[in-house]
Amino acid sequence: MVENEKDREKRLKWFRDARFGMFIHWGIYSLIGRHEYVMNTEHMSVDEYGKLAPKWHPRPNAAREWARLAKNAGMRYMVMTTKHHDGFCLFDSKVTDFNAVNGGPRRDLVAEFVEAARAEGLRVGLYYSTMDWRHPDGGRSGKDAKARKRFVSWTHGLVREIMTNYGKIDIMWYDTTWPLNAKQLQSEKLNAMVRKLQPGIIINNRSGIEEDFGTPEQSIKADTTGRMWESCMTMNGAWGYTPIDTDWKSASEVVRMLRQVATGGGNLLLNVGPSPAGDVPYECTAVFSQVGQWLRKYAPTVYDATDHVTGGHMICGSYTRSGNTLYFHCDRWPGSKLILNSVPGKIKSVRLYGGAKLRFKEESVPRGDMHLARATISGLPELAPDTLSTVIEIELEKYKPRK
Ligand code: H79
């Protein structure tokens, strides 16, 4: 049955409102600590790589700490890798032996994850990469029809397991289909099965079919067609545990990314690569707690404010908007006076978000045969009240979208 737009929007409602989620990349690659691609980048054979599995002994229920961190950071959902390109399944499986219950952990890590996220009231997504470096048919299925038949049936079997064994799942997060296209992978049939097993589920666009939402990776790029989107970003440069990469994002960078996704009506799925034991790197926990603290004050300026506000480029920051209220997020504090160009409407009042009213002056600056609008807000504190980002709330008489 074809779903109409209204029903799709109903299904997507919680996701559109979620704004912020935690991505978890965890697997036997975490033991090496050099990126989740290590099997590929260091040319490890299937046998050599497989020897890692029995060596993995993560702490029981490590996911509970991740879920508490996520909740405290203001995140509303979590997505975890159930199988990355290396083929190791973090869940109990009858389809493959290469799984967490059969060796190493000897526990179903997906079950632990789902239980932990639910306990914190978070929505749950499962990541599954249909690319597979281990399965003998994984690579050759691109050209060999017999291999493809086996590999596609194997893949559908694994997806069936994760969509069957853990109760309600909110997001199906596919990754790379290489070497197959959607037709070869029979993605239409695959996703029909997923929707039958999980009515109400939201599916990303990486099974080769557009489905419910777009997934810009390592970039924040709004979809301006109204289609839902979610940017996934790493905290350092890798998804899997890579402590040698110390180029961590700061709390202000995360707050800025949140404002950027809010402006474009999308979500931020921010990644954590836990250690083999299941510990979240300190550099992440520190940033998450600062972001959470900021969000407790400024939540409405990013969760409930969307819509692209087209103002001229400004060095101090940028807007989100809710109705006739603009929120100017100061990435760089201007000192006692803030000058805004091209405010989209006549200003009624200005205040520090959650604080004192501020003076303002509106001018029309002649330029050739045009008049350019400039607003000067004064009486600001010399130093930024909030170091991560201070928001100035501007109430307009009526928001006038600029072309
Ligand atoms: O799971 C994460 C990535 O492993 C996966 N998608 C996210 C969510 C992904 N698969 N493929 N790609 C991303 C693009 C591949 C980039 C690569 Fe590379 C460039 C692979 C080899 C060169 C980056 C640099 C990874 C290894 C070295």
Image (cartoon, rainbow, N blue to C red):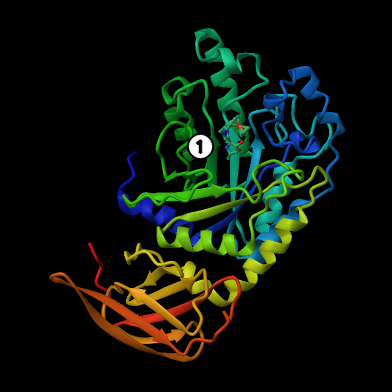
Q: Quadrant of the C terminus?
A: bottom left
Question: As drawn, is 146 to the left or to the right of 71?
Answer: left
Q: Position of residue 381 (x, y in %)?
A: 54, 87
For ligand 1, tell me if the residue under mark 1 lies within 8 Å. no
Specify the quadrant of the image occupied by residue 339.
bottom left
- Label 1 secondary element: helix
Q: Is residue 203 above or below residue 322?
A: above
Q: Looking at the rendering, which quadrant does residue 40 occupy?
A: top right
**Residue depicted at 52% across the width and 59% down the height:** 257
Identified at 43% across, 45% down, the residue is 213
Q: Residue at point 59% right, 70% down? A: 388
249 and 53: which is toward the camera: 249
Image coords of residue 128 (percent x, y): 59, 35
At x 72%, y 24%, the residue is 42
Q: Give residue 255's quadrant in the image.
A: bottom right
Percent x, y for residue 71? 65, 63
Q: Which residue reaches farthest front?
A: 368
Position of residue 267 relative to residue 390, above or below, is above
Mark 1 burial class by Cα count in 10 Å: few <14, some 14-19, many 20+: many
Residue 304 left/right relative to 90: left
- For residue 8, side relative to residue 202 (left or right): left
Mark 1 belongs to which amino acid? Answer: Val
Q: What residue did someone put label 1 on?
A: 194
Name above or below for residue 170 compared with residue 131: below
The quadrant the N terminus occupies is top left
Q: Looking at the image, in which quadrant does ligand 1 appear? A: top right
